[in-house]
Protein backbone atom coordinates (compact mmCIF):
# COMPACT_ATOMS: atom_id res chain seq x y z
CA UNK A 1 0.00 0.00 0.00
CA UNK A 2 1.45 3.35 -1.06
CA UNK A 3 0.23 6.47 0.72
CA UNK A 4 0.75 9.98 -0.60
CA UNK A 5 4.04 11.78 -0.02
CA UNK A 6 2.07 14.86 1.04
CA UNK A 7 1.40 13.57 4.55
CA UNK A 8 3.39 11.89 7.28
CA UNK A 9 7.15 11.72 7.42
CA UNK A 10 8.34 8.28 8.48
CA UNK A 11 11.03 9.81 10.72
CA UNK A 12 10.56 11.80 13.93
CA UNK A 13 12.86 14.69 14.83
CA UNK A 14 14.91 14.40 18.03
CA UNK A 15 12.47 16.41 20.16
CA UNK A 16 9.50 14.34 18.98
CA UNK A 17 11.47 11.17 19.72
CA UNK A 18 12.22 12.38 23.25
CA UNK A 19 8.57 13.31 23.83
CA UNK A 20 7.43 9.88 22.60
CA UNK A 21 9.95 8.15 24.86
CA UNK A 22 8.76 10.13 27.89
CA UNK A 23 5.13 9.28 27.17
CA UNK A 24 6.04 5.59 26.82
CA UNK A 25 7.46 5.76 30.39
CA UNK A 26 4.21 7.23 31.69
CA UNK A 27 5.58 10.75 32.06
CA UNK A 28 3.13 13.58 31.41
CA UNK A 29 5.05 16.51 29.99
CA UNK A 30 4.13 20.11 30.67
CA UNK A 31 4.96 22.77 28.12
CA UNK A 32 6.25 26.33 28.22
CA UNK A 33 4.36 27.21 25.05
CA UNK A 34 0.82 26.13 25.96
CA UNK A 35 -1.35 28.57 24.00
CA UNK A 36 -4.71 26.95 24.77
CA UNK A 37 -6.65 29.72 26.57
CA UNK A 38 -9.15 27.27 28.06
CA UNK A 39 -6.37 25.76 30.20
CA UNK A 40 -5.56 29.14 31.69
CA UNK A 41 -8.98 30.23 32.95
CA UNK A 42 -9.73 32.38 29.89
CA UNK A 43 -12.67 30.50 28.31
CA UNK A 44 -15.95 32.46 28.14
CA UNK A 45 -18.88 31.28 30.23
CA UNK A 46 -20.86 30.71 27.00
CA UNK A 47 -18.33 28.02 25.98
CA UNK A 48 -17.27 26.28 29.19
CA UNK A 49 -14.83 23.43 29.56
CA UNK A 50 -11.25 22.75 28.56
CA UNK A 51 -10.47 22.27 24.88
CA UNK A 52 -8.52 19.03 24.38
CA UNK A 53 -7.78 19.35 20.64
CA UNK A 54 -8.41 15.70 19.78
CA UNK A 55 -7.76 15.33 16.03
CA UNK A 56 -10.23 12.48 15.58
CA UNK A 57 -12.97 14.35 17.44
CA UNK A 58 -13.82 14.37 21.16
CA UNK A 59 -13.41 10.88 22.59
CA UNK A 60 -16.74 11.05 24.42
CA UNK A 61 -18.56 11.74 21.15
CA UNK A 62 -16.68 8.97 19.34
CA UNK A 63 -17.57 6.53 22.11
CA UNK A 64 -21.24 7.47 21.83
CA UNK A 65 -21.12 7.05 18.07
CA UNK A 66 -19.26 3.72 18.34
CA UNK A 67 -21.92 2.41 20.73
CA UNK A 68 -24.67 3.48 18.31
CA UNK A 69 -22.92 1.89 15.30
CA UNK A 70 -22.20 -1.34 17.19
CA UNK A 71 -25.83 -1.67 18.22
CA UNK A 72 -26.94 -1.01 14.64
CA UNK A 73 -24.52 -3.61 13.29
CA UNK A 74 -25.81 -6.23 15.71
CA UNK A 75 -29.41 -5.48 14.77
CA UNK A 76 -28.57 -5.89 11.09
CA UNK A 77 -26.89 -9.26 11.71
CA UNK A 78 -29.14 -12.29 11.79
CA UNK A 79 -28.95 -13.95 15.19
CA UNK A 80 -27.66 -10.79 16.85
CA UNK A 81 -24.02 -12.00 17.10
CA UNK A 82 -21.20 -10.88 14.85
CA UNK A 83 -17.56 -10.58 15.96
CA UNK A 84 -17.02 -7.83 13.35
CA UNK A 85 -19.98 -5.78 14.55
CA UNK A 86 -18.12 -4.01 17.36
CA UNK A 87 -16.91 -0.54 16.36
CA UNK A 88 -13.75 0.81 17.96
CA UNK A 89 -14.04 4.55 18.76
CA UNK A 90 -10.32 4.89 18.04
CA UNK A 91 -11.04 3.98 14.42
CA UNK A 92 -13.59 6.77 14.00
CA UNK A 93 -12.97 10.32 12.77
CA UNK A 94 -15.59 13.02 13.29
CA UNK A 95 -15.73 15.90 10.86
CA UNK A 96 -18.22 18.27 9.33
CA UNK A 97 -19.36 16.28 6.29
CA UNK A 98 -18.65 13.36 3.98
CA UNK A 99 -17.52 15.91 1.39
CA UNK A 100 -14.77 16.97 3.77
CA UNK A 101 -13.97 13.29 4.33
CA UNK A 102 -13.32 12.90 0.60
CA UNK A 103 -10.82 15.77 0.66
CA UNK A 104 -8.95 14.24 3.61
CA UNK A 105 -8.80 10.81 1.99
CA UNK A 106 -7.65 12.17 -1.37
CA UNK A 107 -4.83 13.95 0.49
CA UNK A 108 -4.01 10.78 2.38
CA UNK A 109 -3.87 8.43 -0.60
CA UNK A 110 -2.93 10.55 -3.61
CA UNK A 111 -0.06 12.64 -4.85
CA UNK A 112 -1.02 15.15 -7.57
CA UNK A 113 -1.82 13.22 -10.75
CA UNK A 114 -2.73 9.97 -9.02
CA UNK A 115 -6.08 8.38 -9.90
CA UNK A 116 -9.27 7.83 -7.92
CA UNK A 117 -11.99 5.70 -9.53
CA UNK A 118 -15.64 6.74 -9.20
CA UNK A 119 -18.91 5.26 -10.49
CA UNK A 120 -20.88 6.49 -13.48
CA UNK A 121 -23.77 7.16 -13.61
CA UNK A 122 -23.13 9.07 -10.44
CA UNK A 123 -23.29 12.37 -8.64
CA UNK A 124 -20.52 14.70 -9.92
CA UNK A 125 -19.14 15.54 -6.46
CA UNK A 126 -16.13 13.21 -6.72
CA UNK A 127 -14.79 14.87 -9.86
CA UNK A 128 -15.25 18.33 -8.38
CA UNK A 129 -13.38 17.48 -5.18
CA UNK A 130 -10.74 15.59 -7.13
CA UNK A 131 -10.08 18.70 -9.21
CA UNK A 132 -9.64 20.79 -6.08
CA UNK A 133 -7.16 18.21 -4.74
CA UNK A 134 -5.19 17.89 -8.04
CA UNK A 135 -6.30 14.26 -8.27
CA UNK A 136 -7.36 12.59 -11.52
CA UNK A 137 -10.81 11.04 -11.28
CA UNK A 138 -11.55 8.23 -13.71
CA UNK A 139 -15.00 6.76 -14.11
CA UNK A 140 -15.90 3.10 -14.03
CA UNK A 141 -19.20 2.41 -15.71
CA UNK A 142 -22.18 0.80 -14.06
CA UNK A 143 -24.13 -1.40 -16.46
CA UNK A 144 -27.86 -2.05 -16.42
CA UNK A 145 -29.46 -5.38 -17.27
CA UNK A 146 -32.64 -5.35 -15.25
CA UNK A 147 -30.50 -4.19 -12.34
CA UNK A 148 -27.29 -2.19 -12.07
CA UNK A 149 -23.94 -3.97 -11.85
CA UNK A 150 -20.23 -3.12 -11.57
CA UNK A 151 -17.96 -4.29 -14.39
CA UNK A 152 -15.33 -5.93 -12.16
CA UNK A 153 -13.50 -7.38 -15.17
CA UNK A 154 -12.93 -3.87 -16.55
CA UNK A 155 -11.57 -2.71 -13.19
CA UNK A 156 -9.24 -5.71 -13.01
CA UNK A 157 -7.92 -4.98 -16.51
CA UNK A 158 -7.31 -1.34 -15.58
CA UNK A 159 -5.40 -2.21 -12.40
CA UNK A 160 -3.27 -4.70 -14.33
CA UNK A 161 -2.52 -2.16 -17.10
CA UNK A 162 0.57 0.12 -17.22
CA UNK A 163 -1.56 2.92 -15.71
CA UNK A 164 -2.81 0.73 -12.88
CA UNK A 165 -0.08 1.78 -10.43
CA UNK A 166 -1.50 5.32 -10.42
CA UNK A 167 -4.85 4.15 -9.05
CA UNK A 168 -4.80 4.84 -5.31
CA UNK A 169 -8.48 4.46 -4.34
CA UNK A 170 -11.85 3.35 -5.63
CA UNK A 171 -15.07 5.01 -4.49
CA UNK A 172 -17.97 2.60 -3.92
CA UNK A 173 -21.26 4.34 -3.23
CA UNK A 174 -23.50 1.85 -1.46
CA UNK A 175 -26.22 2.43 -2.64
CA UNK A 176 -25.27 4.64 -5.55
CA UNK A 177 -26.99 7.91 -6.43
CA UNK A 178 -29.01 8.24 -8.68
CA UNK A 179 -29.12 4.56 -9.72
CA UNK A 180 -30.05 3.38 -6.22
CA UNK A 181 -27.92 0.24 -6.65
CA UNK A 182 -26.20 -1.51 -3.75
CA UNK A 183 -22.83 -3.27 -4.07
CA UNK A 184 -23.83 -6.91 -4.57
CA UNK A 185 -22.20 -9.68 -2.46
CA UNK A 186 -20.21 -11.16 -5.36
CA UNK A 187 -19.05 -7.69 -6.42
CA UNK A 188 -17.97 -6.92 -2.88
CA UNK A 189 -15.94 -10.13 -2.58
CA UNK A 190 -14.21 -9.57 -5.93
CA UNK A 191 -13.49 -5.88 -5.29
CA UNK A 192 -12.07 -6.44 -1.81
CA UNK A 193 -9.72 -9.11 -3.17
CA UNK A 194 -8.75 -6.92 -6.12
CA UNK A 195 -8.01 -3.88 -3.95
CA UNK A 196 -6.01 -5.96 -1.48
CA UNK A 197 -3.96 -7.46 -4.31
CA UNK A 198 -3.15 -4.11 -5.92
CA UNK A 199 -2.77 -1.96 -2.81
CA UNK A 200 -5.83 0.18 -3.56
CA UNK A 201 -7.96 1.71 -0.80
CA UNK A 202 -11.76 1.55 -0.81
CA UNK A 203 -13.73 4.70 0.00
CA UNK A 204 -17.22 3.43 0.80
CA UNK A 205 -19.86 6.15 0.81
CA UNK A 206 -22.80 4.57 2.63
CA UNK A 207 -24.92 7.59 3.53
CA UNK A 208 -28.01 6.10 1.81
CA UNK A 209 -27.52 2.54 3.06
CA UNK A 210 -30.47 2.56 5.48
CA UNK A 211 -33.00 3.60 2.83
CA UNK A 212 -33.76 0.31 1.09
CA UNK A 213 -36.58 0.28 -1.46
CA UNK A 214 -36.48 -2.74 -3.78
CA UNK A 215 -33.23 -4.44 -2.69
CA UNK A 216 -31.80 -7.81 -3.57
CA UNK A 217 -30.82 -10.09 -0.70
CA UNK A 218 -27.36 -10.22 0.80
CA UNK A 219 -26.33 -6.57 0.60
CA UNK A 220 -24.06 -5.46 3.46
CA UNK A 221 -22.22 -2.39 4.58
CA UNK A 222 -18.56 -2.12 3.70
CA UNK A 223 -18.02 -0.37 7.05
CA UNK A 224 -15.88 -2.69 9.18
CA UNK A 225 -14.68 -4.78 6.22
CA UNK A 226 -11.39 -6.45 7.31
CA UNK A 227 -10.16 -7.73 3.95
CA UNK A 228 -8.79 -4.48 2.50
CA UNK A 229 -8.12 -0.93 3.67
CA UNK A 230 -11.60 0.62 3.83
CA UNK A 231 -12.71 4.12 4.74
CA UNK A 232 -16.48 4.03 5.28
CA UNK A 233 -18.33 7.37 5.20
CA UNK A 234 -21.64 8.24 6.84
CA UNK A 235 -23.25 11.13 8.67
CA UNK A 236 -26.31 12.87 10.03
CA UNK A 237 -27.10 14.65 6.77
CA UNK A 238 -28.91 11.53 5.48
CA UNK A 239 -29.53 9.62 8.73
CA UNK A 240 -31.51 12.55 10.11
CA UNK A 241 -32.71 13.85 6.72
CA UNK A 242 -31.07 17.10 7.79
CA UNK A 243 -28.41 18.44 5.37
CA UNK A 244 -27.77 21.28 7.81
CA UNK A 245 -26.77 18.80 10.54
CA UNK A 246 -23.11 19.00 9.60
CA UNK A 247 -21.72 15.92 11.29
CA UNK A 248 -19.99 13.22 9.26
CA UNK A 249 -17.60 10.43 10.12
CA UNK A 250 -15.01 8.07 8.72
CA UNK A 251 -14.73 4.50 10.02
CA UNK A 252 -11.37 2.90 9.20
CA UNK A 253 -11.05 -0.87 8.84
CA UNK A 254 -8.83 -3.47 7.21
CA UNK A 255 -5.61 -5.32 8.00
CA UNK A 256 -4.17 -3.98 11.25
CA UNK A 257 -0.84 -2.87 9.78
CA UNK A 258 -2.50 -0.86 7.02
CA UNK A 259 -5.02 0.66 9.43
CA UNK A 260 -2.23 1.73 11.80
CA UNK A 261 -0.20 3.38 9.03
CA UNK A 262 -3.28 5.03 7.51
CA UNK A 263 -4.38 6.41 10.87
CA UNK A 264 -0.91 7.72 11.70
CA UNK A 265 -1.05 9.80 8.55
CA UNK A 266 -4.76 10.63 8.76
CA UNK A 267 -4.18 11.97 12.28
CA UNK A 268 -1.85 14.58 10.82
CA UNK A 269 -4.52 15.77 8.40
CA UNK A 270 -7.15 15.78 11.14
CA UNK A 271 -4.83 17.70 13.47
CA UNK A 272 -4.21 20.32 10.78
CA UNK A 273 -7.93 20.95 10.30
CA UNK A 274 -9.52 20.13 13.70
CA UNK A 275 -12.98 20.61 12.18
CA UNK A 276 -15.24 19.11 14.82
CA UNK A 277 -16.61 21.46 17.46
CA UNK A 278 -16.94 20.48 21.11
CA UNK A 279 -20.19 22.45 21.11
CA UNK A 280 -21.64 20.07 18.51
CA UNK A 281 -20.27 17.09 20.43
CA UNK A 282 -22.48 17.93 23.40
CA UNK A 283 -25.53 17.29 21.18
CA UNK A 284 -24.42 13.87 19.95
CA UNK A 285 -26.61 11.86 22.37
CA UNK A 286 -29.85 13.58 21.35
CA UNK A 287 -28.95 13.48 17.64
CA UNK A 288 -28.16 9.76 17.78
CA UNK A 289 -31.38 9.13 19.71
CA UNK A 290 -33.36 10.84 16.95
CA UNK A 291 -32.02 8.61 14.16
CA UNK A 292 -34.50 5.66 14.39
CA UNK A 293 -37.58 7.89 14.22
CA UNK A 294 -36.17 9.93 11.34
CA UNK A 295 -35.13 6.84 9.40
CA UNK A 296 -38.62 5.39 9.65
CA UNK A 297 -40.22 8.70 8.72
CA UNK A 298 -38.17 9.01 5.53
CA UNK A 299 -38.58 5.33 4.66
CA UNK A 300 -42.36 5.65 4.86
CA UNK A 301 -42.30 8.69 2.59
CA UNK A 302 -40.01 7.21 -0.06
CA UNK A 303 -41.75 3.83 -0.12
CA UNK A 304 -45.19 5.44 -0.30
CA UNK A 305 -44.15 7.63 -3.21
CA UNK A 306 -42.47 4.73 -5.02
CA UNK A 307 -45.65 2.68 -4.72
CA UNK A 308 -47.62 5.65 -6.05
CA UNK A 309 -45.18 6.02 -8.95
CA UNK A 310 -45.57 2.38 -9.98
CA UNK A 311 -49.36 2.73 -9.85
CA UNK A 312 -49.35 5.91 -11.93
CA UNK A 313 -47.09 4.39 -14.58
CA UNK A 314 -49.24 1.24 -14.72
CA UNK A 315 -52.34 3.39 -15.24
CA UNK A 316 -50.76 5.65 -17.85
CA UNK A 317 -52.33 4.63 -21.15
CA UNK A 318 -49.59 6.29 -23.21
CA UNK A 319 -47.00 3.94 -21.69
CA UNK A 320 -44.13 6.25 -22.62
CA UNK A 321 -42.42 6.38 -19.23
CA UNK A 322 -40.97 3.60 -17.08
CA UNK A 323 -38.93 3.52 -13.89
CA UNK A 324 -35.67 1.61 -13.47
CA UNK A 325 -35.51 -0.73 -10.50
CA UNK A 326 -34.27 1.22 -7.50
CA UNK A 327 -32.77 -0.81 -4.67
CA UNK A 328 -32.22 2.03 -2.21
CA UNK A 329 -31.84 5.76 -1.67
CA UNK A 330 -34.09 8.75 -2.18
CA UNK A 331 -34.16 9.07 -5.97
CA UNK A 332 -35.35 7.12 -9.00
CA UNK A 333 -34.48 7.26 -12.68
CA UNK A 334 -37.38 7.60 -15.09
CA UNK A 335 -36.87 6.30 -18.64
CA UNK A 336 -38.63 7.85 -21.63
CA UNK A 337 -38.23 7.40 -25.42
CA UNK A 338 -34.77 8.49 -26.57
CA UNK A 339 -36.30 10.50 -29.40
CA UNK A 340 -37.25 13.00 -26.70
CA UNK A 341 -34.29 15.26 -26.00
CA UNK A 342 -33.54 15.54 -22.28
CA UNK A 343 -32.91 19.26 -22.47
CA UNK A 344 -36.13 19.81 -24.38
CA UNK A 345 -38.09 17.86 -21.78
CA UNK A 346 -36.75 19.86 -18.84
CA UNK A 347 -37.25 23.13 -20.71
CA UNK A 348 -40.88 22.15 -21.33
CA UNK A 349 -41.29 21.42 -17.61
CA UNK A 350 -39.98 24.92 -16.92
CA UNK A 351 -42.13 26.57 -19.55
CA UNK A 352 -45.42 24.70 -19.12
CA UNK A 353 -45.40 23.50 -15.51
CA UNK A 354 -43.09 25.86 -13.58
CA UNK A 355 -40.90 22.88 -12.69
CA UNK A 356 -37.30 21.96 -13.38
CA UNK A 357 -35.32 18.74 -13.08
CA UNK A 358 -32.04 16.90 -13.56
CA UNK A 359 -31.67 15.07 -16.88
CA UNK A 360 -29.66 11.89 -17.18
CA UNK A 361 -26.62 13.54 -18.70
CA UNK A 362 -26.08 15.43 -15.43
CA UNK A 363 -25.00 12.03 -14.05
CA UNK A 364 -23.15 10.91 -17.22
CA UNK A 365 -25.75 8.41 -18.35
CA UNK A 366 -24.44 6.89 -21.56
CA UNK A 367 -27.74 7.32 -23.44
CA UNK A 368 -30.40 9.99 -23.81
CA UNK A 369 -33.83 9.49 -22.24
CA UNK A 370 -33.53 9.70 -18.44
CA UNK A 371 -34.78 12.02 -15.72
CA UNK A 372 -33.88 11.81 -12.01
CA UNK A 373 -36.84 12.23 -9.67
CA UNK A 374 -36.84 12.62 -5.90
CA UNK A 375 -39.06 10.42 -3.72
CA UNK A 376 -38.98 12.90 -0.82
CA UNK A 377 -41.81 15.37 -1.61
CA UNK A 378 -45.11 15.17 0.20
CA UNK A 379 -47.36 12.68 -1.61
CA UNK A 380 -49.64 15.24 -3.25
CA UNK A 381 -46.65 17.22 -4.50
CA UNK A 382 -44.93 14.07 -5.73
CA UNK A 383 -48.04 12.96 -7.64
CA UNK A 384 -48.35 16.41 -9.22
CA UNK A 385 -44.70 16.29 -10.27
CA UNK A 386 -45.09 12.89 -11.92
CA UNK A 387 -48.24 13.96 -13.75
CA UNK A 388 -46.32 16.96 -15.09
CA UNK A 389 -43.48 14.71 -16.31
CA UNK A 390 -45.92 12.36 -18.04
CA UNK A 391 -47.69 15.28 -19.72
CA UNK A 392 -44.40 16.87 -20.77
CA UNK A 393 -43.16 13.64 -22.35
CA UNK A 394 -46.42 13.25 -24.29
CA UNK A 395 -46.20 16.84 -25.55
CA UNK A 396 -42.61 16.32 -26.67
CA UNK A 397 -43.59 13.17 -28.58
CA UNK A 398 -46.39 15.10 -30.30
CA UNK A 399 -44.19 18.13 -31.09
Image: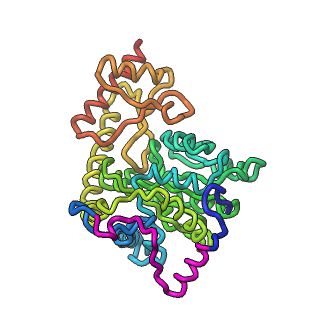
Residue closest to the far bottom: 25
What residue range appears in magenta?
15-42
Picture coordinates of residue 52, whole percent (x, y): 38, 69
Where 55 sits versus 115, above or below? Answer: below
Q: Residue at x 70, y 50 (%)?
A: 166
Q: Nearer the viewer, residue 221 or 212?
A: 221
Does residue 333 appear anywhere in the picture? yes
Report if residue 41 lies within the magenta region.
yes
Q: Residue at x 65, y 51 (%)?
A: 111
Does residue 292 appear anywhere in the picture? no
Q: Is residue 21 left or right of residue 197?
A: left
Q: Nearer the viewer, residue 197 or 389?
A: 197
Report if residue 106 lies within the magenta region.
no
Q: Is residue 67 left or right of residue 140?
A: left
Picture coordinates of residue 1, whole percent (x, y): 67, 63
Where 97 sits versus 74, above or below? Answer: above
Amino acid sequence: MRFSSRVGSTRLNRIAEAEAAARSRGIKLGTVNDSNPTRHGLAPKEVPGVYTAEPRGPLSARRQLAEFLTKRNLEETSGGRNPLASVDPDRLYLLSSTSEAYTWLFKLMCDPGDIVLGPKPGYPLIESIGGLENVVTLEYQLGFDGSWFIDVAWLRALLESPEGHKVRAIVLINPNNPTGSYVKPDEREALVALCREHGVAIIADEVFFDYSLEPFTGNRRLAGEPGALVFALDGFSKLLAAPHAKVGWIEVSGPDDLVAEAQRRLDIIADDYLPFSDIIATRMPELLAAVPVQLERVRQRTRTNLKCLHAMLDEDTAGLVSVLRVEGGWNVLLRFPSVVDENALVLRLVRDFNLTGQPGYYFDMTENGYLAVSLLPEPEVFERNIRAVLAAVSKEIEA
